[in-house]
């Protein structure tokens, strides 16, 4: 069974790596969009068109499950993709882990891109899932872009800036951008020991497997990883090699290309 993951950049790597670890025989179709990245600042109709184009491509290539491991794509185009592919094809979106964080922490910071931090979407999520916790947003300027480029010094600087902007009394931090789990260790190192981190990549992967298994179809594949960059066959962006999940998925994809 082919599972297609769609994102503008490297935000699909954490969920892809979890799927690889949990079900290594799955065939993964990783679609990035270097020509259009980043999606966050783009007009919503443009993003919808871009994501729908990738979803249609996934269907033509035989995908039976589609994952949007990207907050922008999920917020902007999730329902349109579901309408496009129909009820027989599960489409799994991504939501920042505000609810589980607020359930166990009295104070929570949501680290996200500047666009997401200022968005009505995040404000609505905090209102819906923040419960009794005090939840604040922290804009991590430049962090997603630095991750996409594999620029380790810039990543460190962006994390340090975000840590300095995070209130001292914060007990939990939600990683509100799917890129950020790629640098989890660096984020942990920049924070006090008592702060807990919450991200959604493992939960999205687990939900993908549940929806996939509920189809009742054979799921075993060859474990192939195929990469399309703005629709063109290729390899993961060079920046992916800076991260373990990128190296794992990239090595499989490279082997498939050489084969």
Image: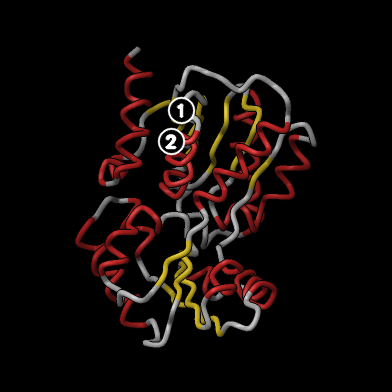
**Callout 2 crowding tier (Cα within 10 Å): few <14, some 14–19, many ≥20:** some
| Horizontal side of residue 178 vs 99, given as left or right | left
Instruction: Kindly identify the residue that appears in the image at 42 percent across and 40 percent down.
Output: 17
Instruction: Provide residue 44's location: percent of width, then percent of height.
Output: 64, 58
Q: Is 229 in front, or is 2?
A: 2
Instruction: Kindly identify the residue that appears in the image at 66 percent across and 33 percent down.
Output: 212
Q: Is 66 situated above or below 163?
A: above
Q: Quadrant of residue 227?
A: top left
Instruction: Provide residue 5's location: percent of width, then percent of height.
Output: 54, 38
Quarter that holds the C terminus: top left
**Callout 1 crowding tier (Cα within 10 Å): few <14, some 14–19, many ≥20:** some
Query: Label 1's element?
Result: loop
Query: Label 2's element?
Result: helix
In the rendered structure, find residue 21 and report the number of the disc placed on it. Answer: 2
Q: What colour scheme was applied to this rendering of the protein?
A: secondary structure
Instruction: Kindly identify the residue that appears in the image at 37 percent across and 26 percent down.
Output: 253
* Residue 50 visible, this orientation: no
In the rendered structure, find residue 24 and report the number of the disc placed on it. Answer: 1
Instruction: Kindly identify the residue that appears in the image at 30 percent across and 69 percent down.
Output: 158
**Cβ atoms at labels 2 and 1 below 8 Å apart:** yes
Q: Check the image and name the residue furthest to the left.
A: 153
Q: Is 43 situated above or below 209?
A: below
Q: Quadrant of residue 239?
A: top left
Q: Is 217 situated above or below 249?
A: above
* Residue 101 visible, this orientation: yes
Instruction: Provide residue 139's location: percent of width, then percent of height.
Output: 43, 74
């Amino acid at each position: 069974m082919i599972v297609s993951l769609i994102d503008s950049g490297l935000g699909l790597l954490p969920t892809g790596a979890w799927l690889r670890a949990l079900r290594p025989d799955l065939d993964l179709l990783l679609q990035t969009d270097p020509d259009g990245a980043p999606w966050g600042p783009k007009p919503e109709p443009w993003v919808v068109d871009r994501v729908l184009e990738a979803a249609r491509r996934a269907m033509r290539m035989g995908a039976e499950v589609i994952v949007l491991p990207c907050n922008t794509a999920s917020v902007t185009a999730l329902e349109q993709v579901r309408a496009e592919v129909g009820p027989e094809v599960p489409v799994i979106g991504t939501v920042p882990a505000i609810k589980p964080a607020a359930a166990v922490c009295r104070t929570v910071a949501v680290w996200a891109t500047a666009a997401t931090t200022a968005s009505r979407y995040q404000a609505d999520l905090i209102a819906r899932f923040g419960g009794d916790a005090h939840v604040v947003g922290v804009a991590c300027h430049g962090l997603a872009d630095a991750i996409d480029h594999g620029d380790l010094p810039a990543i460190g600087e962006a994390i340090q800036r975000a840590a300095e902007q995070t209130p001292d009394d914060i007990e939990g931090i939600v990683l509100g951008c799917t890129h950020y789990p790629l640098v989890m260790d660096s984020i942990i190192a920049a924070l006090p020991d008592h702060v807990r981190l919450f991200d959604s990549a493992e939960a999205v992967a687990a939900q993908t497997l549940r929806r996939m298994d509920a189809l009742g179809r054979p799921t075993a594949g060859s474990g192939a990883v195929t990469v399309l960059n703005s629709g063109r066959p290729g390899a993961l962006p060079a920046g992916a090699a800076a991260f373990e999940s990128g190296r794992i998925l990239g090595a499989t994809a490279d082997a498939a290309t050489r084969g």
